[in-house]
Amino acid sequence: MDKSWITMPRNSPAYDHGVRNFIEFAFQHGSVNDMILCPCPKCGFRKHKTRAEVYDHLICKQFPKGYTVWYLHGELHPQQTNYVSSSVDVASQTNVGANDPIRDMVNDAFGVRNNN
């Protein structure tokens, strides 16, 4: 997802479009009771706000320039994504402890299927 808009002037169409895309993403992936943590400098990720409030805050105040992985709004860090997929691959390819009830319980909890 392109996040170059974060550094653009607040009155630019690209910034406005980026704010709208951020809000849409955040509400799809990280909303609680139809509210999200507002990233504006005033709220500082501490206050839950509605769509309209977040939009107003981010148009009037700058989106945090360093917030490029939206982890507080449901986005996984690229390294987390790679770690999770490689861990599942390793777990599914090994046959160590095939009759271990603890391993079976953990595998069931994380959706890893044993093909024995």
Image: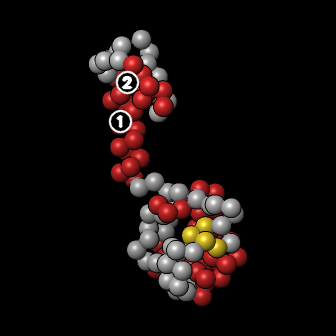
Considering the numbered disc 1 on the image, is that residue within a helix, a strand or a loop? helix
Looking at the picture, how far across and down is residue 57, in whole percent? 61, 82
Say which residue appears at 36% left-offset and 13% top-offset.
Answer: 99
In this view of the protein, can residue 12 be seen by the observer?
no
Distance of label 2 from label 1 (alpha carbons): 14 Å
Image quadrant of residue 86? top left
Query: Within 10 angstroms of label 2, few (less than 14), some, or many (20 or more) residues?
Result: some
The colour style of the image is: secondary structure
* 54 w.r.t. 114: above or below: below
Q: Amino acid at mark 2?
A: Arg
Q: Earlier in the sequence, mark 2 or mark 1?
A: 1
The label number, if any, that marks residue 72 in the structure image: none
Task: Identify the residue at horizontal 64%, vertical 57% (top origin).
Answer: 28
Residue that mark 2 sits on: 103
Q: Residue 87: x and y, percent?
A: 35, 36
For label 2, the SS is helix
Q: Examine the rendering and report whether any part of residue 46 can be seen.
A: yes
The residue that label 1 is drawn on is 87
